């Protein structure tokens, strides 16, 4: 069973999907709900409940609270459990993303080297793109080798907003790489 909830924020609506084990998918504001539900049905089938009142999923309720705290600058780490589907390589990349501290950035190449695959920066980018729970698995903390903001499902302005929220410093349009 998959439980669907929504979080209304000043930035827009986030859609949450969870099962009994954890969060399985999180949309960013602006993502079409039909696309979100279509991807869930492709991965999990049509067994879902719209959980508008948090009656069924305490995990969704907890994420709603944590997400609002994060966007309000009062939370640096998420504690909700995750239950992510992906390839072995994708999961390895996502595990590396979880190690990037709040307020810091790494390049795709740095992550590839940390995985022992120094030539796999593009593959890291593709895994980043398939991250089902942006913000929770902080793919916004991955930038180009020169600090440039490259690629983000929510758009580069939203990525820049998240990084500035976390205190990442910029020089023009590039992050200052301090990690």
Image (cartoon, grey):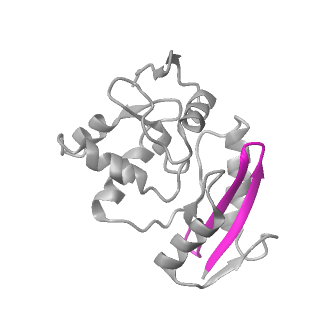
Is 85 placed left or right of 153 in the picture?
left
Residue 48 found in image quarter: bottom right
x then y, percent, for residue 147: 40, 25
Which residue is at a point 40% across and 49% down the rendered structure image? 128
Q: Residue at x 35, y 53 (%)?
A: 127
Q: Is residue 119 above or below residue 20?
A: above
Query: In the figure, is residue 19 to the left or right of 96?
Result: right
> Relative to 162, does residue 117 appear above or below in the rendering?
below
User: Residue 79 at what x, y percent from top left?
Assistant: 59, 53
- Magenta part of the protein: which range? 2-22
Q: Is residue 37 above or below residue 104?
A: below
The residue lying toward the viewer, choosing from 169 and 158, is 158
Query: Image point 73% across, 48% down: which residue?
Result: 12
Q: Is residue 23 above or below residue 74?
A: below
Q: Quadrant of the N terminus?
A: bottom right
The image position of residue 40, as x and y in percent, is: 54, 73
- Kindly report the secondary structure that dominates the magenta region of the rendered protein: strand
């Amino acid at each position: 069973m998959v439980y669907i909830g929504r979080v209304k924020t000043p930035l827009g609506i986030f859609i949450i999907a969870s099962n009994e084990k954890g969060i399985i998918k999180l949309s960013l504001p602006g993502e079409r709900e039909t696309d979100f539900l279509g991807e869930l049905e492709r991965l999990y089938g049509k067994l879902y409940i719209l959980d508008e009142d948090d009656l069924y999923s305490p995990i969704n309720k907890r994420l709603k609270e944590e997400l609002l705290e994060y966007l309000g600058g009062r939370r640096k780490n998420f504690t909700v459990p995750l239950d992510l589907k992906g390839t072995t390589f994708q999961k390895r990349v996502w595990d590396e993303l979880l190690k990037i501290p709040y307020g810091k950035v790494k390049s795709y190449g740095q992550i590839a080297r940390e995985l022992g695959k120094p030539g796999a920066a593009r593959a890291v980018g593709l895994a980043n793109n398939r991250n089902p729970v942006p913000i929770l698995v902080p793919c916004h903390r991955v930038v180009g080798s020169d600090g440039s903001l490259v690629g983000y499902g929510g758009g580069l302005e939203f990525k820049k907003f998240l990084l500035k929220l976390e205190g990442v410093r910029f020089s023009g349009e590039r992050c200052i790489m301090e990690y």
